[in-house]
Image: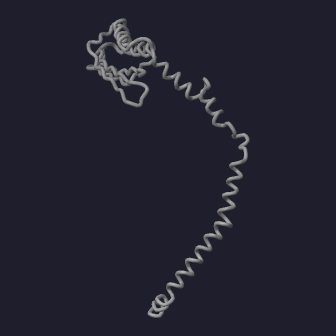
Amino acid sequence: MKRLTWLLRRHGTALALWGGALLIGAALGLHWLVVRPLGQRVDTLQAQPQGPRDGAVERMGEALDSPESPRARLDAFYRHFERDDRLTDRLGRVHGIARKLGLEIKRADYRLDSQPGRRLDRYQMTVPIQGSYPSIRAFVSAVLRELPTVSLEQIQFQRKEVADGSVDTQISFVFHLAK
């Protein structure tokens, strides 16, 4: 170990100089033999016309603007929610359907769920109704049929006694509204 330390002290500077010169020579040789030819190959490939890929971006833009594109279909879907009737008119129609079927909506809870970044707002209407099962089922079916932008979120039935013909129902509708 002492001998190695003595040799490095005595000839360390010369060894470092020759080692550095050797690494510089290897790097230059690698550059001339490998990197430079690859750079020339890249330049020739970029200079060549691309053939069938020319204009691909323009064709993709035209495809997205066609009526059958996914973007156009999604825009048509959202236009379906942009109706002329207001929310108050829709709520009045729900109350009218209940009245026509002999059901009475004594109270209802309303909640708006609007989040930034969404294109649709959710307006939730929770209604407790008491009546016969067939009339409540007809009410829910009529609301969903007459108001296509309304969805049934939850329905809960409760009967006090087995022989009782009337059921207490908690119905939650969601009105989907375009912003």
Q: Looking at this view, name the residue that lies furthest to the bottom.
A: 3
The residue drawn where x is 36% and y is 15% is 133
The residue drawn where x is 57% and y is 29% is 70
Query: Is residue 80 shown above or below 16?
Result: above
Residue 81: image x %, image y %?
Answer: 46, 19
Quadrant position of the C terminus in the picture: top left
Left or right relative to 138: residue 10: right
Quadrant hosting residue 64: top right
Of residue 169 and residue 1, the one placed in the foreground of this image is: 1
Q: Is residue 103 visible to us here?
A: yes
Of residue 91 and residue 77, the one placed in the foreground of this image is: 77
Quadrant hosting residue 28: bottom right
The residue drawn where x is 60% and y is 23% is 67
Query: Is residue 71 shown above or below 107?
Result: below
Quadrant hosting residue 165: top left
Left or right relative to 30: residue 148: left
Residue 47: image x %, image y %?
Answer: 71, 48
The residue drawn where x is 41% and y is 31% is 117
Of residue 94 and residue 62, the one placed in the foreground of this image is: 62
Residue 9: image x %, image y %?
Answer: 46, 89
Q: Is residue 134 visible to us here?
A: no
Residue 113: image x %, image y %?
Answer: 34, 26
Of residue 166 and residue 65, the one placed in the foreground of this image is: 65
